[in-house]
Image (tube, rainbow, N blue to C red):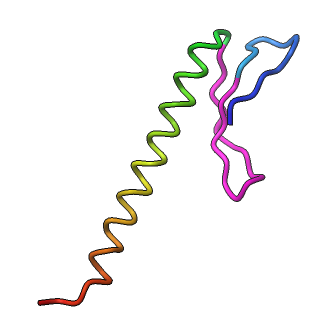
Amino acid sequence: MLGVRKGVLPQYVTWECKGGNDYYWGHYFSDLAAAQKDFCNRTLEAIEMRETFIGKNRHREEPEK
């Protein structure tokens, strides 16, 4: 999640989120572009972790030859 805190510095924050409502591990920024870059990086990391998890589980489901 990328949030904006109006009138408070640092103004921008990215958060990890679990279960749709458990926000934690905030990264704070004064610059919107830096916050957007961090948000994209965190999103890519989450995708890579998911792909790794799915890949490992896929091998477990395949019958041995």
The part of the image, by quadrant, that contains residue 39 is: top right
Residue at left 56%, top 15%? Answer: 34
Q: Which residues are magenta?
A: 13-29
Measured along the vertical axis of the image, is residue 41 above or below residue 34?
Answer: below
Residue 46: percent from the left, percent from the top? 49, 47
The part of the image, by quadrant, that contains residue 23 is: top right
The N terminus lies in quadrant: top right
Q: Main secondary structure of the magenta part?
A: strand
Residue 64: percent from the left, percent from the top? 17, 89
Residue located farthest toward the right when viewing the structure as drawn: 7
Residue 42: percent from the left, percent from the top? 51, 36
Q: Is residue 19 magenta?
A: yes
Residue at left 64%, top 9%? Answer: 31
Q: Is residue 5 left or right of residue 26?
A: right
Residue at left 52%, top 31%? Answer: 40
The part of the image, by quadrant, that contains residue 11 is: top right
Measured along the vertical axis of the image, is residue 46 above or below residue 6?
Answer: below
Measured along the vertical axis of the image, is residue 23 above or below residue 12?
Answer: below
